[in-house]
Amino acid sequence: MSLDRIQVLKFGSSVLPSAAHLHVAVHEIYRHLRVGKKVIAVTSAIGDTTDRLLKQARVIAKQQNEEAIAELLATGEAEAVALLKLALAKAGIAANALSAHNLGLQTDGPLLDANPVQLDLQPLLQKLQQRSVLIVPGFVGKHADDRLSLLGRGGSDLTALVIAQALKHGNPQSPTCRLLKDVAGLYEWDPAADGPPPRRFSSIGFEEATAVGGAVLQPKAVQYAQRQQLNFELGQCSSTVTTLVGQVGTELENSAPTSAPLKVALIGLGTVGHGVYSLLGKHADKFELVQVVVANPHKPRDLNPPCSILKNELDLSAQPDVIIEVAGCSAHLSETLLQALALGIPVLTADKELVANQLNALAPYLNSRTPILRCSAAVAGIVPALEGVGRIAAVDGVQQLQGVLNGTSNFILQQMADGHSFHQALQQAQELGYAESDPSADIYGWDAARKLSLLIHRAWGVQLPPERIPSQGIAALTSTEVGPNLRLVAKAYRHADGRISASVQPTELPKDHVLLQANGVGNAVLIEDSLLQSHLLLGDGAGRWPTAEAVFADLLDVWRLHAKSDFAATLPTSKPSAECLAREASA
Ligand code: HSE
């Protein structure tokens, strides 16, 4: 595993004041997965858990037993690890976790203010090999006699830096470690204090960081980084800016103005629309919902957007800054969406039928470095399939693609292999919100063919319409033909002369084939590059939250571009180029 592809992210209690804020950490982790990183997420205890536990301990005994206190407080981080794993699973991202005992961060010194001595990377790397996200508890170490120890207040910062340092050891290229806080970086003075707004350090040396960062950074962690000459970043989730701390010159930047929220028009309030609507509600600082378009505004529904914004047609005169289309069957909308794109309004869609069938007209909007048509959620749900294929195409070139791209079919096949009937399984997939509004597209292989068509376009720039991809679905299979190793496999291969062969068909896979890791609603994409190296991407391919999370990731990219250009507009000179903005938005 290439160590420089590992991103260490540390989520402090200020970022996770309660379990209701875990979605913020999920967005941030997914942001890094989308650019091809593996993530080690270090978590502090949620909110005031540590103080609450300490208080409890004092009620029991005034005289504190250090060993018991360390064990008690460690439960706060253990709880946060498990909750974050749950939140990621909800979004369809499978993560591994390590307990404080298994992490093996060896310490010495005072039990409640211990110092790191050594970290064995092997358990971490082994877990990261299996899954792209590993969650570990911050703050907690282990003395040589196996007693749990604590790294002192704010000690999760130190945990993250110790891990980053161990990774750096394996690879001289510095890995990225980002400490996520509730501030966008280090400032000249407290931004919450009265008086003129302070400037933010875009970079700062260790000494100065120790002087100004006391309230935000654990001083012991900064001293550790200084001894190790380890650079790291500090910033906010979803943000475009950070402070780089380390062997760097000190530079100050004017604080970015708070950008006005982006005005969002949401088309569709079904399974996925409901998810996107809920996420938008949690980010009112960034997004203002100005229109919700549904076929029947009067239909009773679980969600009740204000009547004033509920419409049955997209109205561009409301001047949305961005349009999210998750209606499922939006062919009739294509003209309005094309009109919006022509006006330069970004459109985000989960509709693979729309994009695959209209690729010719839409390609110009998909292709630029800052595409205004984004459709990550259209292919394989939470799996960053288009992003992965695009990245590999740009670096080494893609030779071959194989994928399990239809969650409904995969779910049905697995249910049938477990003895259920096709019809029972299909009904369940519909109830769980996996199937298309007309499930024919799932069970006849058309949905997989549409997704394959989009992957082919991203890999080779070739427009191969779905109807030209020979496709056989799972509808005709009988129970006796379905075993545990059968998958609906979509495949595409580029011949030496540039021709593309593609197909979708049920395929019996050898028992150790990596695509068998796609279970239930899981999707998998296996990319072989032109150096014949294989790259596997996994995650849930359908359902409310995985799809909504993928749509939201596109939306946050658009927001970062918007915030970045607002910031650039305040600078006296040198507006960043579009290329620079694109890089920022994807990092
Ligand atoms: N019906 C699709 C599937 C939804 O089951 O994969 C996600 O595109």
Image: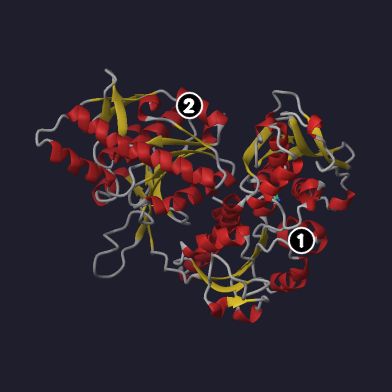
Q: Which residue is mark 1?
A: 354
Decide if residue 177 is in sight here.
no
What x and y, as percent, mark residue 188?
29, 58
For the residue with label 1, is its CB less than 8 Å from the closest atom of ligand 1? no
Other-residue count near label 1 (Cα within 10 Å), few / some / many at <14 / 14–19 / ≥20 = many
Nearer to me, 287 or 177: 287
Q: What residue is at 37 percent from the left and 32 percent from the top?
A: 162
Image side of residue 15 versus residue 355, left or right: left
- x, y percentage for residue 471? 86, 44
In the displayed orientation, state which residue is furthest to the top.
145
425 left or right of 561?
right
Element under disc 1: helix
Q: Position of residue 375 (x, y in %)?
A: 67, 56
On the rendered structure, is 489 left or right of 260?
right
Q: Identify the disc placed on residue 572.
A: none
Do the residues bearing badges 2 and 1 touch, measured as CB atoms within 8 Å?
A: no
Tell me which residue sits at (76%, 61%) in the image.
354
Q: Position of residue 518 (x, y in %)?
A: 66, 36
Please indicate, yes or no, whether residue 478 appears anywhere in the rendered image: yes
Query: Is 564 above or below relative to 442?
Result: below
Dividing the picture into quarters, in which one does residue 561 lie? bottom right
- Residue labelled with disc 2: 170
Side of 254 where 384 appears, left or right:
right
At 33% from the left and 43% from the top, the residue drawn is 45
Say which label, 2 or 1, has the lower sequence index.
2
Secondary-structure class at tag 2: helix
Q: Give amino acid for label 1.
A: Leu
In the rendered image, which quarter contains the N terminus? Answer: top right
Q: Amino acid at mark 2?
A: Gly
Residue 344 higher or lower than 34, as above or below: below
Mark 2: give few (<14), some (14-19) or many (20+) Cα within 10 Å.
some
